[in-house]
Structures are given as structure tokens and as C-alpha cells.
Image (cartoon, helix red, strand yellow):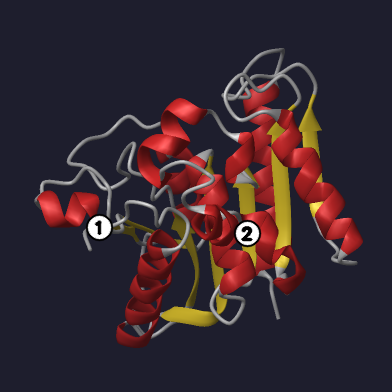
Amino acid sequence: MDGWCIKPPQFDPDRQYPTLFFVYGEPAGQTVLDGWGRKQDLWHFMLAQQGYVIISLDNHGTPAPRGRAWRKSVYRQIGIMTTESQAAGAKAIIQSRPYIDPQRIGVWGWSGGGSMTLNLMFKYPDIYKTGIAVAAVSNMRYYDTVYQERYMGLPDDNEQGYKDGSPITFASQLVGNLMIIHGTADDNVHYQCHEALVNELIKQNKQFSMMSYPNRTHSIKEGDNTVRHLYGLMTDYLETNLKNLT
């Protein structure tokens, strides 16, 4: 699996640092590219200046130049095999790099990365202690058919896959700190996904944090000060629930 890592200034390999994984993991795109300019980049740099290690990995199925088998390996396995790949990569990194504090591992992502964050938090609580999921698909059956059926097949033909790939199925397994964020006018991942997950977490008596941005779309950028507020919210959450986690 390809990856990148941002280390704090004046990095000391004899110290242990809180580590935040940035995830996407869907077949629609990559996070590990030879390029700059993602809107998250400056935020990641700022977090590194505050003492975090930031890491991102591309799991099986992403459109990396790794051939047909790599690309097609996740067909009908979105949220299942993809999550297993991310967790396996994180374990290998933690075991091989003593400067990463295994007790302060966080994960965050947007859209498909939000879904990946939820799956990782629910399925691998032994690894991930804190997560921030933005605009996540909690239930694959609530997402649009032109995308979901392309990679997962028809719901009636892959009922177990749709169930096992949907984070909401495993909400009862939440252990760590979770923040979920969504725009109420999301034009891509319907707000229904957010509400369904909120209701399930309440049903399972799981404590969590949430933020709804009124009339914001999938990009959560409309309105005065929205982007600054969002990234400030996430920064403060990580400060309390990851960097200072004891």
C-alpha cells in the first residue's frame, strides 16, 4: 500500500507522537498522489506543527497504477476488504515505527472517507481511539445507485455485502471518541445517513459528539465563516480527544 507521512518540525524519533490517519479508501479516488493542493493540506501541516504525525494510505481498489487485480479486488467488498486493508496498514506502521504512540491513534475522513472512519472506529477499536467522520454514508442502501451498484452489485444480489460494508451495522461496537459532522442540505450523501446513524448510536447507548451545519451541501463551505468554523471544531476535538488523550 502506498502512503505518505507528515512529521512535526524538530521531529524527535525518540519521542512518541499522537498520530492521525487521513482516509478515503473508495474506488472513486486516491489520497496518495504526487501532487499538492488538497484543501486539507494546510490543516494537516498546521496539525503537524502542533505535534501530530499525519499519515495517509491507499487501500486495495483505489485507482492507483497497480493493475487490474488490485482495482477489481474490492468488487462487492466496499467497506469490508477496504477497511481490512486500512487497519492492516495501520497495524504494520504502528509496530514498525516506535515514534508513533499506539494509545493515541486517530482517524478522519470526508464522504467515503467518513464512511471509512466509521467502519474503522466500529470494527477496530483496539487501534483507533478517536475519529472524525464528515459527510459519511452510514448505510449503503441510502446512497445513489449509479455509484453504489457499480461497485457493490445489486442490493438483492449482495445483501450480506451491503450489510457488512455499512458502518451502521457495527455501531454497537463503538468504544472510542467519535465526532460526526454533516450538512443538512448535503447534495451527495443525504442527511438521512447522518440521522440514521445518530438514532442507532442512541439506541445502542453510545456516547458521541455531532455537528450539523444548516443548509450546507456536501462540501460544507456555504455561509459566512463556515470552513474556518469546521476546521476549528475538528482541531479542538483532536486537541481534547487525541493529543491530550490519557
104 vs 106: above or below = below
Nearer mark to the viewer, of 2 and 1: 1
* Element at label 1: loop
**What residue sits 32% from the left and 80% below the top?**
92
Q: Residue 132, percent across and down? A: 63, 52
Q: Earlier in the sequence, mark 2 or mark 1?
A: 1
Q: Residue 230, percent across and down? A: 67, 34
Q: Distance between the residues labelled 2 and 1?
A: 27 Å
- List the residue tagged with mark 2: 131
Q: Does residue 54 appear in the picture of this structure?
A: no
Which quadrant is home to the N terminus?
A: bottom left
What's the amino acid at mark 2?
Gly
85 vs 218: above or below = below
Q: Do the residues labelled 2 and 1 touch (CB within 8 Å)?
A: no
Q: In the image, which disc is placed on residue 73? A: 1
Q: In this view, does 90 lie to the left or right of 166?
A: left
